[in-house]
Image (cartoon, rainbow, N blue to C red):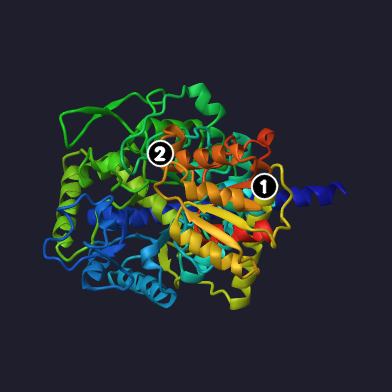
Amino acid sequence: MKKLFAAIVAITIFASAFAQDKAAQEKAALHEYVQSMTTRQKIGALCVMNFRFWTDSPMGHQNYKPALAAENPKLFTPQNTINSTIYKTIRDYNIGSVILFGENMTDAALAKKFIRDLNSAALDGGNLPLLFFADQEGGNVARVYDYSTPSAMAIAKTQEPQNAYLCGRANGQLLLDYGINVDLAPDCDVASNPQNPVIGIRSFSGDPKAAAEFSEAFSQGLMAAGVLPCAKHFPGHGDTSVDSHLDLPVIYSSLQKWKSREAVPFKANIKNDIPLIMTAHIQCPRLDKTKIQSGKSAKKIVAPATLSKKILTKILRGSLGYKGAVITDAMDMRAIYDNWTPDQSFVLAVNAGCDLIINPINVYSKKDLEFLEDFFAKVEQDLQNGTLDKKALDAAALRVLELKKKAGLIQIQGKKIISLAQKVAPMSKEQKQEAAQTCANIQIQAARASAQNVSLPIKARSKKIAAFVPFQEKAELLQKSFAARGITNVDFVCYEEKKSATASDIAKIKGAGLILVFTHLTGNAVKDKRLWQAAYPAAIAKEIKKAGRAKNTIGVSMNLPYDKEIFSQKDGFAWTALYNYTQSGYSRAAQALFD
């Protein structure tokens, strides 16, 4: 027995030593590959480009602020096919990654061909296969629409981490059906601030432990599907009251408070080998008060986390022991773009410890090739004069290669790096139906678990119903969903931009046997209750109480669930939440209420 045990120990030690030796050899091969790359190849390898929109205007898009103006359909059209400019961008500038948006994905066949063509452009330039990214969190943040998954907060309300795993796997399967190999999810932010205008239901919970448990399970589901997850937005975007798409938020949490709250979900995911973490464009002066010069003004600004070496290198890699890759949030968001030029923010981010730079500069027109060339030339000059740290650039390029290996895009044979065929796992119609049904069941489970003062589904098909809905298109969707269930005796009232109840609204209240008030509470409306999203539900609830109809009313929260105090149980109101204001969320609301 002793000899057998000794033999087992020896084999284990040998296997471990062999694995370590192989890992060291692969690391050396990747390092050698990086050393063989030109400066341009390294810069391109770090770029995560988007081709979300296009314009044929000879003026290009640079006359507009690129973070948001491109969403104006009068100026730009969605892009879902490759053209000569996009092809040249990928091929000639050695681009390593592409991020895809909903505008790219409206036609499944075109989207899949677009992804194949983009990858072919990279290979035509002698480059390695592309990493493809998408924000497929679920709920209101999704880029592929074959089926819908619940938001993070909805999943956590079921109190079953297995549901997070199932939704993560469903998201991963759908992405890989298109050839997208990295999901920019899960959201690891802690929902600690009800006034947050950008996170909200994207967070699993305001409880750090629950946010950790559910985000970790979601990550495991993605990896089970063969897609890499990304924990975001480090060091934590949950406590902001400003949207970093529009401005530069500040969080004043102490280091100790951060460790006990925001850090918890990230630590859990790091412990379970999360391969990628996304930064937040937020200032955290209690974590790093270092000021850096704005390239667009005379001001010195507290470094946002994306540009903070202390936060990304000393805290994330040092204190938390993270070994994987770091990706920025989009650099054309105004928190960054309003303060630094594209080349400046790229250099600052790489020096801070970022490996992948999302939207370093947008190519939305033929003219933009001029701006792209200027961007590359300036970054090259920054490397030559020492502004860009060569060690940081090389380390970033190496981690990008390691991420491509984890994604199954390359393999190492001796000292050679071999490109592999694009990773795609087509789903059958039956598989998509099964995944869609699983996600629908979880969404309905969340609504019923959230229900207060009512047991769902309700038996009220024969009653006269008054339904107050925040948007006309959602009212029309509900009308169809109700009609499909034989519920036709319904008065729908769209209250978008209304702040008070009309005489007609009050008459509908008094004449209904069941009153449904669908709400769309935003972080801004939590902060300012004068906004219609908060003002109208409060006004209609007051009129319902005055009419003695509270016991006939259900408040149905479609976005932030912080309006349940309006529909107080002590006043007789019932309340539930869907945590999903998309068309899918409204369809599930009908199911949760009546099926």
Q: Position of residue 147 (x, y in %)?
A: 54, 66
| Image disc number at residue 454 | none
Q: Nearer the viewer, mark 2 or mark 1?
A: 1
Residue type beneath disc 2: Leu
Label 2 neighbour load within 10 Å: few <14, some 14-19, many 20+? some
Residue type beneath disc 1: Asn
**Towards the viewer: 344 or 73:** 73
Confirm or deny contact between disc 2 and disc 1 (CB under 8 A): no
- Is residue 440 toward the left or the right of residue 83 in the image? right
Give the CA distance from mark 2 to mark 1: 26 Å
In the picture of the structure, the residue carrying the numbered disc 1 is 552
Q: Give the structural element (helix, strand or loop) at label 2.
A: loop
In the picture of the structure, the residue carrying the numbered disc 2 is 531
**Towards the viewer: 425 or 577:** 577
Q: Position of residue 487 (x, y in %)?
A: 64, 65
Does 415 sit above or below residue 107?
above
Residue 221 visible, this angle? yes
**Towards the viewer: 509 or 474:** 509
Q: Quadrant of residue 389?
A: top left
Residue 275 visible, this angle? no
Q: Which callout, 2 or 1, points at the residue further toward the start of the chain?
A: 2
Does 271 sit above or below residue 239?
below
Q: Quadrant of residue 209?
A: top right
Q: Give the structural element (helix, strand or loop) at label 1.
A: helix
